[in-house]
Image: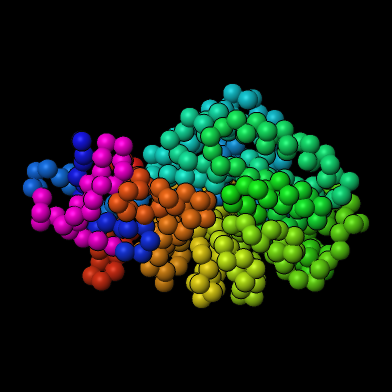
């Protein structure tokens, strides 16, 4: 059997450990055959690299189908003006949309992303995903603007998207868009459709203060936003609690669930979500939060609650690139109290568990085929630091 030996000064396991003086031995398909002491190998037989080897990254939140809008929407507008702008850019030639999807998928792979949790409102990405070297969990995302008169139409529209996905090899599920756009009856439909499948569900959560305001008092910017689209909210009643509690009341607590963004989560919100479901995961999209709201979540709250953190890029409409290593850099730049092995655990092992790909991905372990990524991470006395440069897939 042919095999390859790689080493670098640092090797991150993907779930918290860091090894030195270690050789990673893989077969020709990239399956890890062994991890061995460098002393036992002839140096000439090993490919030596500078920096650190990390398992393939898991991007738990992306919208690949929005890749063609890169750079179009200005930064720092806040979420509601951002969404209003995105809606304006609906009419693009299909060719430009398709080309941008193919390019973004390739770039994610080259920067070391091994699996993606990807939101789809359309079927535009399905043919690229089918051919991709990346594993995808597609989330067919639904919303009826909290409006029971729109639920049936929404179901018809998204059943058509879901059925097209049926023909592809990847994992897929129906998911609610966000607490502020999904009625109780639409949540019921989503739960019933996912019931028999071993899949993950995701929901955008507490990305902006206005979302909590809507649920606390039925006031704030979302009221004007809905009015501007001519949608009435007469069936919606404020719950008097932050928005996540509405999601917890209507989602299926037996499903692995990813809450995405969470910029406005309180300690109580985080604890409630963890108590609700032992398979609660949180996806942080730091660069997208900075792009849209110039904000970043309070990570100490999640760490103190022992929350299972994962990392997403969101879309090229709200990010400068789709690269998990760039997310790691940003998290560490603004919150260097979190050590690098911990952030890598968010980006690798936790993400793989969240999307159900942990049998193959997420850690450098014998028998898995996680991909190997070379990153500019170096030792600095007892800790680590991030150098200039980018991540690069080597296997
Ligand atoms: Zn999103």
Q: Is residue 121 visible?
A: yes
Q: Name the residue: 35% across, 48% down.
A: 368
Percent across and percent down for residue 16 are 36, 64
Residue 339 left/right relative to 80: left
Residue 54 vertical position relative to residue 85 in the rendered view, above or below: below
Residues drawn in magenta: 18-41
Q: Is residue 30 left or right of residue 68?
A: left
Between 96 and 357, the residue placed more toward the observer is 357
Q: Position of residue 43 (x, y in %)?
A: 9, 48
Q: Is residue 390 above or below residue 162?
A: below
Q: Quadrant of the C terminus?
A: top left
**Left or right of 23, for residue 214:** right
Residue found at the very far right of the displayed protein:
234
Vertical arrangement, residue 375 with respect to residue 208, above or below? above
Q: Would residue 376 be seen by someone viewing this image from the given angle? A: no
Residue 273 position in % (x across, y down): 63, 68
**Residue drawn at the location 79% of the way across and 36% of the way down:** 156
The type of colouring in the image is: rainbow
């Amino acid at each position: 059997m042919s095999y390859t030996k790689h080493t670098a000064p640092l090797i991150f396991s993907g779930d918290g450990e860091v090894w030195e003086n270690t050789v990673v031995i893989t077969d020709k398909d990239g399956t890890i055959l062994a991890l061995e002491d460098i002393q036992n190998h002839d140096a000439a037989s090993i490919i030596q690299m500078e920096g650190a080897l990390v398992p393939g990254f898991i991007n738990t939140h992306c919208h690949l189908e929005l890749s063609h809008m890169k750079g179009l929407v200005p930064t720092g507008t806040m979420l509601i003006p951002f969404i209003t702008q995105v809606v304006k850019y609906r009419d693009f030639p299909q060719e430009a949309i398709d080309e941008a999807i193919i390019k973004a998928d390739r770039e994610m792979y080259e920067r070391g992303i091994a699996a993606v949790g990807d939101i789809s409102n359309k079927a535009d990405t399905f043919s690229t995903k089918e051919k991709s070297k990346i594993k995808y969990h597609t989330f067919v995302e639904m919303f009826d603007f909290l409006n029971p008169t729109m639920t049936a139409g929404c179901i018809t529209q998204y059943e058509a998207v879901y059925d097209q996905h049926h023909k592809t090899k990847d994992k897929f599920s129906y998911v609610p868009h966000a607490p502020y756009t999904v009625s109780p009856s639409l949540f019921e439909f989503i739960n019933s459709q996912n019931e028999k499948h071993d899949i993950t569900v995701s929901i955008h959560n507490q990305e902006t203060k206005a979302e909590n305001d809507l649920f606390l008092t039925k006031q704030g910017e979302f009221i004007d936003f809905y009015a501007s689209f001519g949608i009435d909210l007469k069936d919606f009643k404020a719950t008097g609690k932050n928005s996540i509690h509405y999601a917890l009341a209507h989602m299926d607590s037996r499903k692995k669930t990813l809450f995405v963004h969470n910029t406005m989560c309180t300690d109580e919100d985080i604890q409630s979500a963890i108590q609700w479901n032992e398979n609660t995961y949180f996806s942080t999209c730091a660069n997208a939060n900075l792009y849209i709201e110039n904000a970043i979540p309070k990570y100490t709250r999640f760490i103190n609650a022992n929350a299972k953190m994962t990392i997403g890029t969101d879309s090229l409409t709200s990010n400068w690139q789709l690269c998990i290593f760039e997310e790691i850099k940003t998290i560490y730049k603004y919150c260097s109290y979190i050590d690098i092995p911990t952030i890598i655990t968010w980006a690798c092992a936790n993400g793989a568990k969240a999307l159900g790909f942990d049998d193959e991905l997420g850690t450098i372990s014998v028998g898995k085929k996680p991909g190997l990524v070379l990153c500019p991470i170096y030792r600095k006395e007892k800790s680590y630091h991030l150098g200039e440069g980018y991540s690069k897939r080597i296997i």
